[in-house]
Image: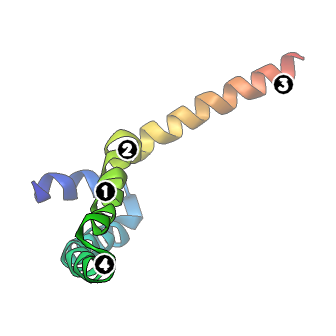
């Protein structure tokens, strides 16, 4: 699964591929740190409330799956179309 995530994560980054791959590797470290943080939270506020942390993480993963993983070309194309529409409306007024 990680090879697919890594490939999609660094796709179309161009000269920023090195930075993107570094951030992806930092995410692996985050996967090792989050359980420790959740354990500390469980000790302080209880196990039930400590599960709020993974919920937040899963919500971010959901966001990334739906919107954050769009390739740059699609993201910029959508912005260009919106900008062109707005400028067309402004000029026609």
Q: Which mark is residue 71?
A: 2
Of the pair 63 and 22, the residue shown nearer to us: 63
Discs 3/4, front: 4
Kindly report the distance in space between the C-alpha atoms of the residues bearing marks 2 and 1.
26 Å
Drawn side of residue 60 relative to residue 92, left or right: left
Q: Which mark is residue 90?
A: 3
Quarter of the figure with residue 81? top right
Q: Image height check: is 87 above or below 36?
A: above
Kindly report the distance in space between the C-alpha atoms of the residues bearing marks 3 and 4.
52 Å
Kindly report the distance in space between the C-alpha atoms of the residues bearing marks 4 and 2.
36 Å
Is disc 3 surrounded by few (<14), some (14 to 19) or many (20+) residues within 10 Å?
few
Kindly report the distance in space between the C-alpha atoms of the residues bearing marks 1 and 4.
14 Å
Q: To which residue does mark 4 refer? A: 41
Rendered residue at 33%/62% (across/down) = 52
SS for callout 1: helix
Kindly report the distance in space between the C-alpha atoms of the residues bearing marks 3 and 1.
43 Å
Rendered residue at 18%/77% (across/down) = 32
Of the pair 75 and 61, the residue shown nearer to us: 61
First of labels 1, 4 by sequence position: 4
SS for callout 2: loop
Locate residue 3, reporting x and y percent. 12, 57
Rendered residue at 38%/57% (across/down) = 13
Of the pair 37 and 9, the residue shown nearer to us: 37
Is disc 2 surrounded by few (<14), some (14 to 19) or many (20+) residues within 10 Å?
some
First of labels 3, 1 by sequence position: 1
């Amino acid at each position: 699964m990680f090879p697919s995530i890594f490939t999609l994560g660094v796709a179309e980054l161009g000269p920023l591929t090195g930075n993107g791959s570094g951030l992806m590797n930092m995410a692996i470290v985050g996967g090792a740190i989050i359980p420790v943080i959740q354990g500390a939270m469980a000790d302080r506020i209880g196990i039930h409330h400590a599960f709020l942390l993974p919920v937040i993480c899963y919500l971010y993963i959901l966001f990334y799956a739906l919107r954050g993983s769009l390739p740059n070309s699609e993201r910029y194309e959508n912005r260009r179309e919106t900008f062109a529409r707005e400028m067309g409306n402004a000029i026609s007024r």
